[in-house]
Image (cartoon, rainbow, N blue to C red):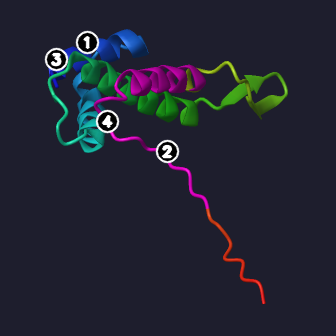
Amino acid sequence: MNIEAVKTLFTLFSGEDFSEKYTPLINLSVSEVEKMLLPDADSYDVRLDFLCASVANNHLQQINSARERSEFTVAGKMLTTSQNTAVSHSEKLLRDYINLCSDLIKQKTFVFMSFADVTEE
């Protein structure tokens, strides 16, 4: 993965100017994506740069929403519960890039089924 490309894409997705304070977030995201890679996947595929940037953006939006979850009114403070949030949009973007990279990464969703052992007496 190209870290400089990930930084550029992160600034595009987040709308933030990149500064060194986001470096740990980028490193964490690159590490997460590396753990998702299939053994024979090309780690220099450009799609992975987009996936890393969307993972970092999603983490940033979650961090920001934890701080900005309250809304100030004349009567005081109240929690906002809007579905049209930056977090929900970053999650949709992340899902899109996970789907785009589906041939490069391990699937994280599993279906567990169980069957009862029925013995007749």
Q: Is residue 26 left or right of residue 15?
A: left
Rendering coords of residue 86 (x, y %): 56, 20
100 or 91, nearer to the observer: 100
Which label number is shown at residue 4?
A: 3
Rendering coords of residue 107 (x, y %): 41, 41
Q: Earlier in the sequence, mark 4 or mark 1?
A: 1
Amino acid type for the residue under numbered disc 4 = Ile
Name which residue lies at 23% across and 39% down.
34
Q: Which residues are magenta?
A: 88-113
21 or 47, nearer to the observer: 47
Amino acid type for the residue under numbered disc 2 = Thr
Amino acid type for the residue under numbered disc 1 = Thr
Vertical side of 65 occupied by 113: above or below: below
Q: Is residue 20 magenta?
A: no
Q: Quickly name the residue at label 1.
A: 8
> Mark 2 and mark 4 in contact (Cβ < 8 Å)?
no
Which label number is shown at residue 105?
A: 4
Vertical side of 94 occupied by 116: above or below: below
> Mark 1 and mark 3 in contact (Cβ < 8 Å)?
yes
User: Which structural element holds mark 1?
Assistant: helix
Amino acid type for the residue under numbered disc 3 = Glu
**The C terminus sits in image quarter:** bottom right
> Mark 3 and mark 2 in contact (Cβ < 8 Å)?
no
How much space separates mark 4 and mark 1, taking CA atoms?
A: 22 Å
